[in-house]
Amino acid sequence: MSPFIMDWLNLLIRWAHLIVGIGWIGTSFYFVALDFSLKRREQMKKGVFGTAWEVHGGGFYHVEKYLVAPDELPDDLIWYKWEAYLTFVTGIMLMIVQFYWNADVWMIDPNVLDIAPTVAIVYSILSLTIGWFVYDWLCKSGIGKNTPLLMGMVFLLILGASYFYTHVFSARAALIHVGAFIGTIMASNVFGIIVPNQKKIVASLLKGEKPDPKYGVIGKQRSIHNTYLTLPVLVMMVSGHYPIITSHPNAWLLVGLIIIGGASLRHLIIKHEVGDPLKGYAWTFPAIIIALGVAMYMTMPAPPRIVNGQTVLSDVKIVDMVKTHCAACHSDTPSNESFEEAPKGIKLDNLDQIKKYNELIVKFAIQSDYMPLGNETNMSAEERQQLDNWLASQK
């Protein structure tokens, strides 16, 4: 398939993924905030658990929540499920177009693990599938009845997946897979637990039976999991643009910090939205600051690596090195079949162009091993050091 078609497929699927993802996140945020804002009142209808008064767009809304279901259901009952389903479907489509289609370029780095493209794809699919079954087992086991313990185990599950991905896939693919791992759990919660449980409640009601309240409790548990994982998964999904994170030797630990900071921020937002006293969630501020501070400290750039008296390569040798490792993509005439034009218009065919993009080369090829893409040309650490020395001498 031509790069032109691939680019348009990538763009359109990514756009669709963003649209339905925003819809899913929006409804998730709203209903969690609504759930926490419900209050018991002196006069409520039979079966009502709590109510909330809201104002938006110049109008006032009075919302009632039934733990199981009212005695009668309207014909126009709205189900919020397709946003989650389509987010997952478009995410998988994007994974196929972006990563599986050219797995040898996007997923594999021989310096991490030299595997065949087919093997990389199998690892990807199996890990996403196994992750859901392990998570689901944890929730349904005795561990699921102990909220703090379950929270810790799910955290360790994601951390373990992060360690696996960062030791199997290229830097750019690793954290995207962490995001896909979490996203699969979230979408499966909706598809496999939340919506089916709601359907069981509705079915019981239509038969004239009293619905089992456990289905509502289980659904609420998975819904809360989803909302607390939302902010961390968003960081994972855009991580490919930030090699400062993806190319860190301990990127899997950064994932842990992002989860802690993101979940704490989500808790802060929820509690603030429903008007809870600050003292009840004040702990989130130091948790966020510490997690972010540690992550920033871990990713601080190393001091200049220029050694006094070390010989700097000649301009000719530097041009030859860059052509060997970079010109397959970053050239007037890319030889890499994935590109018809140089990515982002960055061309490195001559000395002037190399000098022009000095800082970008340092960022993506020296401070990280993000480039060459997938290290397809096997650029060595010694070559990166030599290139670093030369670039520093040009400043």
Image: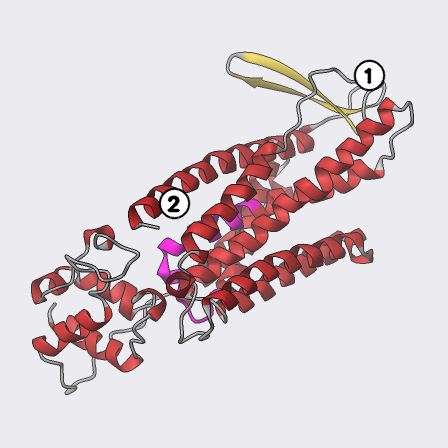
Label 1 element class: loop
Whole-percent x and y of residue 2? Answer: 31, 50
The amino acid type found where label 1 is placed reads: Glu
The answer to the question of whether label 1 and label 2 lie on touching residues, with beta carbons closer than 8 A, is no
Residue 267: horizontal and vertical position, in percent? Answer: 60, 43
Write the residue at 9% across / 79% down: 314
Q: Which amino acid is tagged 2? A: Asn
**Is residue 16 found left or right of 312 in the rendered image?**
right
Q: Quadrant of residue 209?
A: top right
Query: Is 254 colored magenta in this rendering?
Result: no
The residue tagged 1 is 72
Q: Is residue 383 above or below residue 41?
A: below
Which residue is at the front of the view, 134 or 377? Answer: 377
Residue drawn at x 75%, y 56% is 137
Q: Residue at x 28, y 73 (%)?
A: 303
Q: Main secondary structure of the magenta part?
A: helix
Colour mapping used in the image: secondary structure
* Residue 276 x %, y %: 64, 35
Residue 345 appears in view: yes
Q: Which residues are magenta?
A: 230-251
Visible in this render: residue 275?
no
- Helix, strand, or loop for circle 2? helix
The 10 Å Cα crowd at callout 1, few under 14, some 14 to 19, many 20 or more, is few
* Residue 233 painted magenta: yes
Question: Hey, which residue is sitting farthest top in the picture?
Answer: 59
Q: Which residue is mark 2?
A: 10
Front in this rendered view, residue 7 or 393: 7
**How crowded is the residue under tag 2: few (<14 C-alpha within 10 Å), some, or many (20+)?**
some
Q: Nearer the viewer, residue 98 or 5?
A: 5
